[in-house]
Amino acid sequence: MILRRFAHTRFGTLGRLQVGGVDLYTVELPWRGNERNESCIPPGRYNYQRHDSPRFGETLWLRDVPGRSEILFHVANSPADLDGCIGPGLDYGWWSDRGELAVWDSRTAMDELLAQCEDNGMIDIHTWTPEYP
């Protein structure tokens, strides 16, 4: 599973998630120095496992994130729905009513993600930074 972040704003972070033969999108908090509940996690390679969360139901739990714990992939449409976790979606855009980045159809995307994933695996998270001449 590979997550390539492609948009970084003060409103949040968007990415493209490739898992199996499926492409999904993700929404996260903006980068704020890896602060707990305030920031997306650092790029890296992390183990994940399926997890039945009392709050979110079936999720994927990212393990061994430096300085962080309980980082989940769970249903979420915008950064306001997250405390450092990752929300999958089928598409992305701007939620004009709330003035923030968003992903759409998060429940459907989460179901697709779970259908494509093994019970345990690896995710590579990359942050794309444009290079200027």
Image (tube, rainbow, N blue to C red):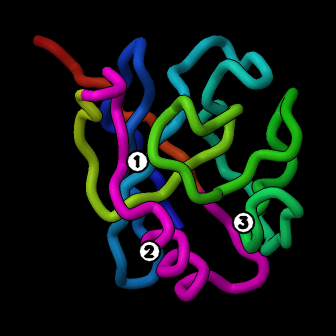
Dot 1 or dot 2, earlier in sequence = 1
Q: Position of residue 17 (x, y in %)?
A: 42, 60
What residue is drawn where x is 68% and y is 66%? 122
Separation (CA) of disc 2 from disc 3? 15 Å
Type of amino acid under label 3 = Leu
Q: CA distance from mark 1 to mark 3?
A: 17 Å
Q: Residue visible at 27% across and 48% down? A: 92
- Between circles 2 and 3, the one closer to the viewer is 2
Query: Pointer 3: what residue?
Result: 60
Magenta range: 97-123
Horizontal and vertical percent for residue 98?
36, 25
The answer to which of 106 and 131 lies nearer the viewer is 106
Say which residue label 2 marks.
108
Asked whether 105 falls inside the magenta stretch, the response is yes
Reading the image, the residue beneath label 1 is 4
Q: Which residue is found at the position 74% from the left and 61% from the top?
A: 56
Q: Measured from the top left, where is residue 104 in percent x and y?
A: 33, 55
Is residue 116 left or right of 10 when viewed as pictured?
right
